[in-house]
Amino acid sequence: MASIWSDEGKLRTWLAVELAATAAWAELGVVPADAARALEANATAPTPERVAEIEATLHHDTAAFVDAVAEKLGDEGRWFHYGLTSSDVVDTALAIQIREAGSLILEGIDAAFATVVARAEQHRDTLQMGRTHGVHAEPTTFGLKLAGWAFELDRSRRRVARALEGMRVGKLSGAVGTYAATDPELERIACGRLGLEPAPTSTQILQRDRHAELLAALAVVASSLDKFALEIRHLARTEVAEAQEPFGKGQKGSSAMPHKRNPVVAERICGLARVVRAAAVVGLENVALWHERDISHSSAERVVVPDAFLALDYMLDRFTWLMDGLVVREQRMRRNLEASFYLFFSQRVLLALVESGLSRDDAYRAVQRNAMRAWDEELDFRDLVRADDAIAGRIDLDEVFDLSAYTRHVDTIFSRLHALSPREEPIHV
């Protein structure tokens, strides 16, 4: 990923666009075939240092790049960059970089998905207290929690794949998109050589709604990873202690407190998600430009597009590592489930009373009375209900207090997970 977004990587890609255009001109009979072959054989990507040296005088990076390449060519160098404007090269090359970086992001999502599914299968029946508002609600399983993450990752992959397909376009339409100095056929041939589709229309640039969609899709992935990591951080709290990050031999959790074992990787993921989301805001701001274009988008894109890809690539790698080695404390999950005096059975008691013929409000009040006493006096809710003749005489409490009721449909959800379609979206690398 770093290589794709390096200065060297950018200049290599610019050169590939230039040579594709020259070859297309030769195919159309505009550039002599010998000259095109000579450029293909002899043109090399200049060093970033040489481009910067020339740019110090020209104050134009694309022009500096063109001069740096041409200075090492002979007479054929006059055909280099023939008919093109800077954005023809920069925008088309950016589409190629995004395509290559996007394939790595998809690989990262696939790796994260596979790891989450494997851990979900491992813990499909591991009971855990489900929490709403941070408060005990009803039991779920840790596997179901992770299955939800897997579905979310699958949706994210589809979003990113769609956005990448929207970015698989190039433009060689000239100064304001009229082909006045180029030719639509040149654009078609050159883009074909580069594995891109010609944009159906462009101004001096590719319209930035494409880039905004992509950055938004990356931000959604980052936000999902943020959500997953935040959950791990909550589960790692001392009072909960249901999960822990991998902790290597010799690792130190604190410079001052030897006992510390902090969720630092999860916290890192949460922090970097803010960076990727910020990039999405810049992408949206870049949609609105003056007339056929201005250059206000360019400086911002040079920061946020590489940063978004680099940050998300790292986040996916660390999240996969985190999930693969996550320490799951099943016994602590069970103790936490029992810590709220079995109050989670309250809904099952309520529904059984309604089924017995009691009005819903009367049933609710009867259950709530025992629930509040269990909470205030730290008593077993089940014992209180069994001692309440108004409840115990109406319903089968052995059936009501059955933990298996919370896991009986787990297989249904996992069958949906297994039914996810294979990852066959075409990514043209």
Image: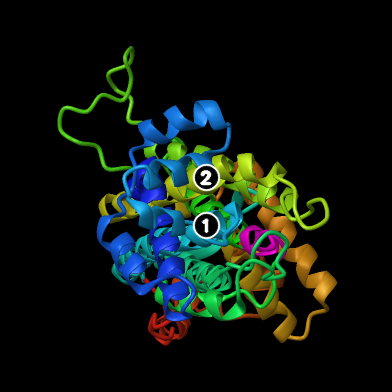
Residue contact at pointers 2 and 1, CB within 8 angstroms: yes
Residue 144 seen anywhere in this rendered image of the structure? no
Residue identified by numbered label 2: 62
Residue furthest out toward the front: 75
Choose between 392 and 423: the one closer to the eye. 423
Q: Can residue 210 be seen in this view?
A: yes
Q: In this figure, what is the number of numbered marks?
A: 2
Residue in view at x 49 percent, y 57 percent? 81
Depth order, front residue of 191/303:
191
Q: In this view, does 251 lie above or below 228?
A: above
Question: Camera-side residue: 147 or 142?
Answer: 147
Q: Mark 1 points at which residue?
A: 89
| CA distance separating discs 2 and 1 | 8 Å
Earlier sequence position, callout 2 versus callout 1: 2
Instruction: Decide: few, some or many residues near mark 2? Use Cα within 10 Å; few <14, some 14-19, many ≥20.
Output: some
Q: Please name the colour scheme applied to the rendered image.
A: rainbow
Furthest-left residue in this view:
249
Q: In the image, what residue type sits under mark 2?
A: Thr
The kind of residue on which mark 1 rests is Val
**What residue is at 67 percent from the left and 55 percent from the top?**
371
Image point (57%, 76%), residue name: 198
Name the element at disc 2: helix
The part of the chain drawn in magenta is 203-213
Residue 122 screen position, x and y as percent: 29, 68
Residue 138 image position (x, y, % from top left): 56, 63
- Please state, as top left, top right, bottom left or bottom right, where the C terminus lies in the image: bottom left
Residue 166 shown left or right of residue 426 in the figure? right
